[in-house]
């Protein structure tokens, strides 16, 4: 009888210690809540100070289908990858962009840092022109009412030192006003009634490149 009571006492003590240890870890572990100071929480993303050493024009990617990376990771993707853009995103920073920072009639890299690139994983059609699958530098010559989008094969260049002899395709598309200003330059694919559109937005302007296949 004594041995039975002793056994139950030991088991109870072990259980109490285990619970106390678990509570300790829960209060100091990865579930700890961090409160954002009001001075930071109430500012707009473009107004927040960047940490020293961070690029002011961060790199981004966009895909079509739009949720392709998520579908690929889950193994549930049914549509093949059609296109991908790799580019950096400069900020407006209270500057007048078009006609000032971006000059009309001059080449614009559609981004920052390394030349922006677009890659097609199958042949596509853009404004009636057949574009072969492959990777291209993408840049722009903006005008007040339209932009000329250029695909070039001078890959892996920094900035916009374009060899125009390697221009492969040119497309002129209209420009429209946006519903709100874009602080960061943005490129994104959007599903269209036929195929998709590559939307390019910054400040208060937007241009869309129609793509079918």
Image: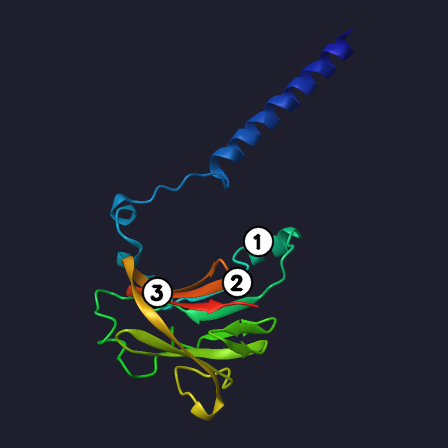
SS of the residue at dot 3?
A: strand
Q: Earlier in the sequence, mark 3 or mark 2?
A: 2
Up-down relation of residue 50 to residue 108 (above or below):
above
17 left or right of 60?
A: right
58, 196: nearer the viewer: 196
Mark 1 neighbour class, 10 Å CA radius: few under 14, some 14 to 19, many 20 or more: few
Q: Which mark is residue 70?
A: 1
Q: How many dots with numbers?
A: 3
Placement of the C terminus among the 4 image quadrants? bottom right
Q: Position of residue 148 (x, y in %)?
A: 37, 79
The tag on residue 195 is 2
Q: Is residue 122 left or right of residue 203?
A: right
Q: CA distance from mark 2 to mark 1?
A: 20 Å
Q: Which residue is label 3 attached to?
A: 201
Q: Nearer the viewer, mark 2 or mark 1?
A: 2
User: Is residue 5 visible in the rendered structure shown here?
Assistant: yes
Point 34% across, 71% down: residue: 174
Label 2 neighbour load within 10 Å: few <14, some 14-19, many 20+: few
């Amino acid at each position: 009888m004594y041995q039975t009571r002793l056994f139950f006492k030991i088991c109870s003590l072990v259980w109490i210690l285990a619970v106390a240890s678990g509570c300790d870890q829960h209060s100091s572990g990865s579930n700890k809540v961090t409160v954002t100071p009001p001075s930071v929480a109430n500012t707009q993303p473009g107004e927040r100070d960047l940490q020293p050493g961070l690029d002011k024009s961060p790199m981004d990617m966009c895909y079509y289908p739009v949720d392709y990376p998520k579908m690929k990771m889950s193994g549930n993707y049914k549509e093949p990858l059609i296109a991908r853009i790799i580019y950096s995103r400069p900020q407006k920073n209270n500057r007048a962009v078009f006609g000032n920072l971006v000059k009309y009639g001059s080449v614009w890299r559609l981004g920052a840092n390394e030349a922006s690139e677009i890659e097609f994983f199958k042949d596509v059609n853009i404004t009636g022109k057949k574009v072969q699958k492959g990777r291209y530098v993408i840049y722009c010559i903006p005008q007040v009412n339209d932009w000329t989008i250029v695909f070039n094969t001078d890959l892996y260049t920094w900035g916009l030192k374009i060899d125009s002899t390697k221009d492969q395709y040119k497309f002129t598309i209209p420009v429209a006003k946006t519903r709100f200003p874009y602080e960061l330059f943005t490129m994104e694919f959007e599903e269209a009634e036929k195929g998709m559109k590559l939307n390019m937005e910054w400040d208060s302007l937007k241009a869309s490149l129609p793509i079918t296949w």
